[in-house]
Amino acid sequence: MAPTPDLRAGGAPAPAVLDNAVWAALDGPHAHLAERVGRAARYLPGTYDFAALADPAAADVPEILDLVARSRPGPFLNRTVDMGTYLGIRNEGRLIALAGERLRLPGRTEISAVRTDPGHRGRGLATRLVRAVAAGIRDRGDTPFLHAAADNRRAIRLYESIGFTFRRRSRIVQVRTPGTPGAGRALCVVRGSARRSPTRPAAPDGRR
């Protein structure tokens, strides 16, 4: 998903770099976090369980991992915090909500790990954090974008209410090396999709 471009301010539709966001990050701003073999690359172990093809047809970490386990977001490992800025909200000293940056492409940064403890949902905490992370991204001249599972309607409604719009679908494939036990760690490989959808208008109140 990507924010609706403000054409009155000279905005333009999102570029093709978003068609293969993981590769664009590993080949660009996150190159220092990458392992590369030819035209394939992956994040260093412990950073992020994602890899991509060039042309596909810290102290709070334990608490963050605990919140991840309670709220069941996407992949989050011990070094995922190295990928960008993460903001959180605490209640009586306990971390109850989180959002941060993951993929960083030339001119684009992904908002990710948007999660709220199940006992504290419905208070607008995720909205506050997404807005704050997006503001930090824009302050350094980048455009925020994000991914959401197709069946996560709650998250999609939240992002659309803030002003994000659907751009395209991508397919994520989990792979293991031959001989890896079924319980072993899987690596996710992002493949582009030819399926596209028109950009939808922003929320009626025009918020970003």
Image (tube, grey):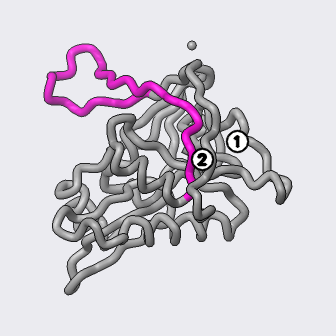
Say the numbered circle drawn on residue 2.
2
- Residue lying farthest bottom? 92
Asked whether residue 172 is drawn in magenta, I would say yes
| Occupied quadrant, residue 92 | bottom left
The residue lying at 41 percent from left, 63 percent from top is 99
Q: Position of residue 49 (x, y in %)?
A: 36, 39
Does 23 appear above or below 96? above
The residue lying at 22 percent from left, 65 percent from top is 117
Q: Point out the image quarter for the N terminus.
A: top right
Q: Is residue 14 left or right of residue 66?
A: right
Q: Is residue 42 left or right of residue 71?
A: right
What is the three-letter code of the residue carrying label 2? Ala
Say the numbered circle drawn on residue 166.
none
| Tag 2 near tag 1, CB within 8 Å | yes
The residue lying at 59 percent from left, 44 percent from top is 31
Q: Position of residue 8 (x, y in %)?
A: 83, 56
What is the three-letter code of the residue carrying label 1? Ala
Q: Point out the image quarter for the C terminus.
A: bottom right
Does 88 appear above or below 204? below
Q: Which residues are magenta?
A: 163-189
- The earlier-in-sequence mark between 2 and 1 is 2
Q: CA distance from mark 2 to mark 1?
A: 7 Å
Callout 2 crowding tier (Cα within 10 Å): few <14, some 14–19, many ≥20 = many
Q: Position of residue 48 (x, y in %)?
A: 39, 44
| Occupied quadrant, residue 90 | bottom left
The residue lying at 60 percent from left, 42 percent from top is 200
Q: Position of residue 15 (x, y in %)?
A: 72, 38
Does 76 appear above or below 58? above
State the residue position of label 1.
14
